[in-house]
Structure formats: C-alpha cells, structure tokens
Image (cartoon, rainbow, N blue to C red):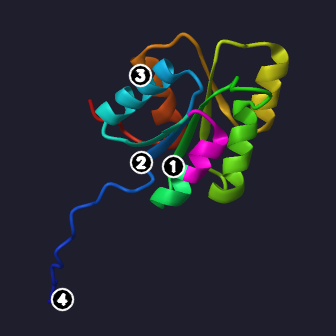
Amino acid sequence: MPRVVSVPVPEPQKPEAEAVVVIEDDPVQLMAVRMILEGWGLSVVAAPSRERAQAALQQGGLRPGLVLSDLRLRGSETGIDAVAALREVLEAIPAILMTGDTSPEQVRAAQSAGIHLLQKPFGPEHLRSAIERVTGWTLAG
C-alpha cells in the first residue's frame, strides 16, 4: 500500500497585490476613498497626481494590484494618462476610472486603454463590486 506523507501547508498570506493606488486631486474625495479601501483591509497609496503616486510607490517599494483614478486631474493630466504612465512600470495592472463624464469620447478612450469606468456619484457597494470584478479579489467588510 502506498505511503502518504502529509506536509503542513502554510497559511496563505495576503498577497501584496491587494494594494491600491488611488489618484484623486480632490483631497476630500481622496481621503474618503482611502478610508473605504482601508476599511476593507487593502493597503492604499493615495496621491493627488500621477507624479506623487509614482514617487510614493518608489519610496515604499509596494507593488499594487489596482489603480483607481479620477478621470479629470489637475491641469491637462487625465486618469487615462496616469494609468498609462503607471502601466509602464507596473505592466498590465488593472485600472478603474472614477468619473462623472460619460461622453462617448471618454468612454471610447478608456475602453481602448483597457480601463474600466465607475460612474460618479457611487456608493461603497458599487466601488466594492467594481474592484472585485476587475481584480478577482474578495474584499472584507
């Protein structure tokens, strides 16, 4: 009869990928989204611009699994630009744009960049659903 050796299986560790970069130039919205995400047990890098997000990522050494960005940022910067810049470093990272602008041009631009849209205003349940759908994560809370 074959002998079966049981090997202890380590407890799964929460992957570092369950971290989110949030780019939002409105400080109140940035804080609100950060608090919601942290309440679900996610690590958050929150920044008002792409440049600040990139600097925080380099400094912290975190490799996030999602970018969540406002579509319209300060100046001429857009969330689409921010996601593209982060994807140069983080490769095919999933992304969600938070926007109240659903013009056909913006929808096409986001779709062609492989970015999901989340229509503002939205509640936590819509945010959770979008994140779980895009990442495959199951969020606590």
Give the spatial CA distance, label 4 vs label 1: 43 Å
Question: Which of the two labelled residues, at mark 4 and mark 3, occupies the earlier sequence position?
Answer: 4
Question: Which of the two labelled residues, at mark 2 and mark 3, occupies the earlier sequence position?
Answer: 2
Give the spatial CA distance, label 3 vs label 1: 20 Å
Give the spatial CA distance, label 4 vs label 3: 58 Å
Q: Residue at x 32, y 54 (%)?
A: 14
State the residue position of label 3.
32
Q: Residue at x 62, y 56 (%)?
A: 90
Please give the label number shown on residue 65.
Answer: 1
From this view, report whether residue 51 is shown above or below residue 133: below
Looking at numbered disc 3 in the image, what kind of residue is underneath it? Ala
State the residue position of label 2.
18
**Disc 2 to disc 1: CB gap under 8 Å:** yes
Looking at numbered disc 2 in the image, what kind of residue is underneath it? Glu
**Disc 4 to disc 1: CB gap under 8 Å:** no
From this view, report whether residue 106 is shown above or below residue 94: above
